[in-house]
Image (cartoon, rainbow, N blue to C red):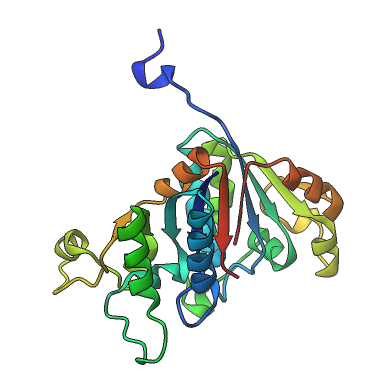
Amino acid sequence: MAEPWEEDEGPVKKFMFVNRKAPYGTIYALESLEVVLISAAFDQDVSLVFVDDGVYQLKKGQTTDGIGMKNFSPTYRALEGYDIEKLYVSKESLEERGLSEDDLLVDVQVMSKSEIADLMDDQDVVLSF
Amino acid sequence: MKFGILVTEGPYQHQASDSALQFCRAALEKGHEVMRVFFYNDGVNNSTRYTTPPQDDRNIVNSWSELAEKHGIDLVVCVAAAQRRGIVDEGEAQRNGKDGNNIAEGFRISGLGQLVEAGIQCDRIVTFGD
């Protein structure tokens, strides 16, 4: 039998988080990740997009000792445990920066800008950081 | 329509706060509902009552407080983002051993869940930021 708090599932909306900035230099990437983690608790349909310098957020081998910041990139690996598995990365943004899927620390779907635009069109809530 | 507003940049530094205020006023004037304004990233700086702009400039913080009072709008400041940037209410000041608080009238400090909840409950989330 379902527990009382499991019965009322409420509305499920499509939330997309668009990550556009490099992981360090500004706080946007870190604070975006904080919203993503909270959203997982609401049982919504969550996806993440990485475009522009945002693709650097997923780059393997980040070392932050020299800049005195916490390396939060391992958290992206933990997203799967929160049932957040839809990670989309812009093909053009990777290519412009000389990166490929092999350079990334998590499994992602690489998509063209127009495919990402179509996905975005399909969302209820788009939050861009 | 029921709107949720997200403000992610600080006042004066960036036009996002002004635009968000103007959007709220325009939406309310047209008979729409603004369920909540959520302040995140440097947007939390919209909520300190110590803001003292020159007399011939607009007071953005007071404008938010007035809007909240007049229309009963829920102004919510993200607690984690606020703590990083030195925005505290009485409760947070006590919990963190601070010697005072600086939250302006009409604002409350709460969690990021309030943003996600607004996303679920509102017809649209409109972001003002960079």
Q: Residue at x 50, y 49 (%)?
A: B31
Residue occupying the point 29% across, 57% down: B108
Tell me: A68 left or right of B94: right
The one of A37 and A60 positioned closer to us in this rendering: A37
Where residue B6 appears, x then y in whole percent?
A: 50, 58
Q: Which x, y percent locates residue A61?
A: 64, 63
Residue B30's place in the image compared with B59, above or below, is above
Determine the residue located farthest toward the top in the rendered image. Answer: A1
Position of residue B115 relative to residue A41, above or below, is: below
Indicate the quadrant where residue A18 lies: bottom right
In the image, B66 versus A7, the foreground residue is B66
Residue located 17% across and 71% down the image: B98
Q: Residue at x 49, y 60 (%)?
A: B24
Q: Is residue B129 left or right of residue B93?
A: right
Disc count in the image? 0
Residue A31 image point, x, y percent: 49, 61
